[in-house]
Amino acid sequence: MSELKEELKGKIIEQLNLEDVSVADIADDDALFGDGLGLDSIDALELIVMLDKDYGIRLSDPKEGRKIFESVQVMADYIEEHRTK
Amino acid sequence: MKKVYINSIASISPQKTYDNCNFLDEITEYNDTVIFAQDPDYKQYIPPAAARRMAKGIKMGVVASKIAMDEAGIETVDAIITGTGMGCMIDSEKFVSAIIDNNEQYLTPTSFIQSTHNTVAGQIALGMECKAYNFTYVHSAISFESALLDAKMQLENNEAEHILVGGVEELGAHTTKVHRLINHIKPEPVSISEVLHSKTEGAVFSEGTNFFVVSNEKTKSCYAELVAVETFNTLQKEKVSEAIETFLKENNLKLDDIDLVVFGNNGDVDFDGYYNKLSEGIFSKTQQVFYKHLVGENNTVSAFGVWLASKILKTQTVPEIVKINKINSSEIKTVLCYNQYRGQNHSLVLLRKC
């Protein structure tokens, strides 16, 4: 699980071009949207595509993302449970 | 009709031109076939949250526009008009590569949103919260001049008071590879001192941006009066001199009235003849300068020619590095910029000291 969380942090930084952020700067429970990393709706779409491409998880309702992308911890839990690859 | 003035300028190029206090004081030597723009401190101008989705071309355009706006001393404009021949190549390549690599699946929005030709003008408007006229011209080597002509007409007719106009190009790896394959890029490295006398085909490719605030009122920072702009999609080599003389006549000028001519020589042995014919012909007694040995070739690099002419007119100095011949005008009052790319899309921009 901790390996997956590190992997997710790296992917978030790389795919969302968070130039000044390192893996160590993101705590497992940090909010990704709003006051936390400050991600926005375009980033949410990028993360939905990442779930599908890298973990085989297709979200039928994009609104589900709101809960799933709450923090790296929540994302990792969801991926562990639903991943197909 | 109102007169049109260039009230501020900004340039990001392969030379250190982003600081308006300098005028080619320090030259960066190149010996290459492709040269990249020197980066200013983008973070000084763009908040990190906004910058993270911007490719180099967008960053360069946004920063150059801010430098030009600061120098003009204005907060907003009545129009933002840009020109770009190739648009936002880096994100276009990223988006198209993703389509191919992922078998048309998993397409992400960012590179698509940022890949359109009008992204730069759009981002400038967003940053400035400017909801006025916003337009981008895409027409190969006369993209910038088309934008400049639009701005000039609006200002002359008093439809606008201040317009931000500029040209921007960025280098994309795949596009550069394609241009190399079709021999539009020089086969071997050329140093800046060799460009003018190069015996090979193609040009040294580059990227960069140049922005100007043009207004129908002269301000303290004024560089030059923009007298006339004309473009030609096609023009035979034998007809260029005649076209220039007609252009000057339409502006009540004779060849003798031109104190300095800015040529767009890029060292392509197949096409520099257009300039050489003028250099040895109608302008043989006129002071001549060029700039592509310093900043390379791209679809809107002719805007650097206008930047150079503006600097010369304001400072009344001509850096040694840009001189083609040994003629020195005692006072530079009228400057003509002539450019073409691969024998097509010719442009004439006439500037006067203000």
Image (cartoon, coloured by chain):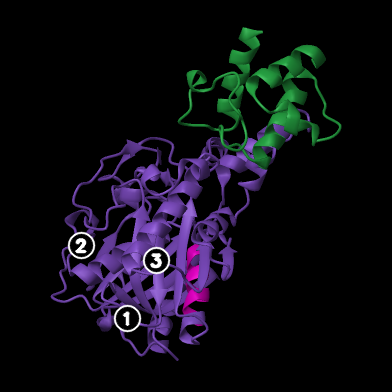
In the rendered structure, which segment of residues is drawn in magenta? Answer: B142-153
Residue wearing tag 1: B218
State how far apart marks 2 and 3 are (Cα). Answer: 28 Å
Q: Nearer the viewer, residue B65 or B324?
A: B65
Q: Main secondary structure of the magenta part?
A: helix
Could you tell me residue B215's position as x and y percent? Answer: 40, 77
Q: Is residue B287 left or right of residue B101?
A: left
Question: Which residue: 39% across, 49% down?
Answer: B45
Q: Residues within 10 Å of mark 3 (few under 14, many from 20)?
A: many
Q: Is residue B16 above or below residue A72?
A: below
Q: Residues within 10 Å of mark 1 (few under 14, many from 20)?
A: some
Q: Which chain is purple?
A: B
Disc 2 or disc 3, which is closer to the eye?
3
Q: Do pointers 3 and 1 mark residues of a single chain?
A: yes
Q: Which quadrant of the figure has residue B255?
A: bottom left
State which tag comes first along the sequence, 2 or 3.
3
Number of disc labels? 3
Chain letter behind tag 3: B
Question: Which residue: 20% across, 47% down?
Answer: B26
**Quadrant of the drawing holding the C terminus of chain B:** bottom left
Chain letter behind tag 2: B
Residue wearing tag 2: B325
Q: Colour of chain A?
A: green
Q: Is residue A34 left or right of residue B286?
A: right
Question: Which residue: 50% across, 74% down?
Answer: B78
Q: Is residue B153 above or below residue A69?
A: below
Residue B256 in view here: yes
Residue B100 in view here: no
Q: Nearer the viewer, residue B161 or B296?
A: B161
State which tag comes first along the sequence, 3 or 1.
3
Residue wearing tag 3: B212
Q: Is residue B203 left or right of residue B130?
A: left
